[in-house]
Image (spheres, grey):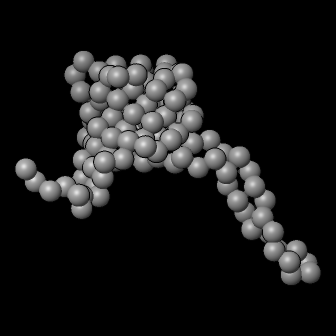
Amino acid sequence: MADTSRRVAGTAYFSVDGVSYSMTGEVGYSPSTYKRETVINVDGTKNYIETPIQGYIEGTFRDLAGLTVADFNAMTNVTVTLELANDKTIIGSNMWTTDPQEVNSDEAKFKVRWEGDVQEA
């Protein structure tokens, strides 16, 4: 059996509410809950502004036969699970899709972004 302890990337498995989908390998996530912006006051003191942001999981998928792209747009309150090559599991709960899904027919792929609560395991 191959030693995969040094593997950091290359493969990933993706599912929504337990249903697996075929990805093209372009995936990302953010478990962040705040965005901070540095502000410098006229007297030279430095502070920051903290604004809440929403975590996300996104990926690019293959438009295969039997798949209905419109189903992604209807997804709300779903659990998204992403298993990465480095043995990390990313779980998004109570998620909803955001941007409309647009298929690139030259390569039969489309991007989907879910927003909600994201945790790394």
Residue 104 visible at all: no
Judging depth in this view, the residue of 86 and 72 nearest the camera is 86
Examine the rendered structure and indicate whether residue 85 appears above or below residue 15.
below
Residue under the point 71% across and 46% down: 52
Farthest-out residue, bottom: 44
Q: Does residue 118 appear to the left or right of 26 in the view shown?
A: right
Farthest-out residue, right: 43
* Residue 71 lies in quadrant: top left
Q: Does residue 22 appear to the left or right of 46 in the view shown?
A: left
* Residue 36 lies in quadrant: bottom right
Examine the rendered structure and indicate whether residue 45 appears above or below residue 86.
below
Residue under the point 78% across and 59% down: 49
Judging depth in this view, the residue of 29 and 119 nearest the camera is 119
Residue under the point 46% across and 26% down: 79
Examine the rendered structure and indicate whether residue 10 appears above or below residue 116.
below
Residue 95 visible at all: yes
Judging depth in this view, the residue of 108 and 82 nearest the camera is 82
Task: Give x and y (percent) for residue 41.
Answer: 88, 74
Task: Give x and y (percent) for residue 30.
Answer: 52, 48
Task: Give x and y (percent) for residue 61.
Answer: 32, 36
Judging depth in this view, the residue of 91 and 54 nearest the camera is 91
